[in-house]
Image (tube, grey):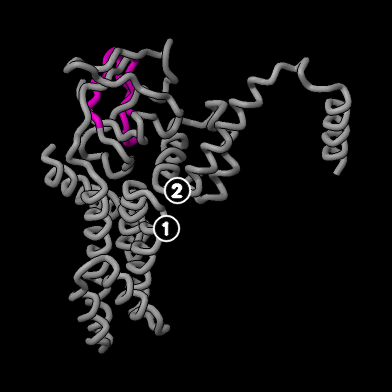
Amino acid sequence: MSSDYLTCRQIVELVTEYFEDALAPEDRGRFEEHIMSCPPCRAYLEQMRQTIRLLGSIPEETVPPEAEEALLAAFRGWKRD
Amino acid sequence: MFAYAFLAKGAVDPLSGFVWPTPRDGEPGAWVSRDTAPREALRGYPAGDLPYWLDEELWNIELAGALTERGHLLLGERARLLGRIDAWTDAVAWDLVAASARRVARPAAIALREHGRTEAAARLEDATDLGDLERAATSAADHPHPAATLAAYVADVCFYAHDAGVAAQGAGVAAKMSAYALASDVDDASRPERLAAERAWQAAWLVDRLGL
């Protein structure tokens, strides 16, 4: 990434790497600067953080077997598509 | 090291969601470290970098341990909040929006006047408040004309600042948009310097206005 700023589309593409701390320091800085001057992207980041927090708090055993199977089937289908 | 920190309402780090322990009874907030807070929350900003991080609350922060400079911020190993800077208010944030928009309105008016659009230029220059400025800029930009580009940027700065909903976030939008608008007519090589110069002007405005 050589541009001096990131677009909103790039923010969406990079958000997982941001949460995983996988961005280069320079890119992380540009990511954060964009977030702080773009309310929609800031809201998106907050929604993602909430989602991760909530999903991270669901123990695996609380997912009903039928729901687990439906999700796995959906993911398998998504892979094939 | 002493620096500044912009936080969301309630002393919340806007990027990690970490809630800072705040000062009580005249004493600084408790020290937090990488064991008790996200590493990225242990950050502070020099006065010259404040315009990049505008948010609802401005705090004095102390950073300790090995310091890492990264772009427009400093990361520490430990940090604590020293006190809130009450001078940073919604009203001041809106004043920064207006000041940023007027920075673009000046060259916009010059461009309009150079192309014979004296009345539109005068409306931009004479605008008394942000609403008036937005109306004048929108009107000037309504006519497809090369001289109208900067006026359109002025209208955008005003519109998106209002659209942010939160004064401090609107100021962040306006500061960034005006810097890029003013750098839009320079070549790629000198654009970073032009952007930095505008950010420096914004930082100086904040330092002066907030008495930092």
Q: Residue A47: within the magenta? A: no
Pointer 1: residues within 10 angstroms few (<14), some, or many (20+)? some
How far is mark 2 from mark 1, CA to CA?
Answer: 9 Å
In the figure, residue B33 lies in which quadrant?
top left
Q: Residue B64: within the magenta? A: yes
On the rendered structure, is B13 left or right of B79?
right
Disc 1: which chain?
Answer: B
- Labelled disc at residue B163: 1
Q: Are marks 2 and 1 in contact (CB under 8 Å)?
A: yes
| Residue B189 visible somewhere in the drawing | no
Residue B172 spot, x, y in % from top left = 34, 49
- Per the image, the residue denoted by label 2 is A39
Residue segment shown in magenta? B59-77
Residue at the extreme top of the image, as rendered: B35
Name the main secondary structure of what is drawn in magenta. Answer: strand
Q: Residue at point 40% right, 81% down? A: B142
Q: Residue at point 85% right, 44% down? A: A81
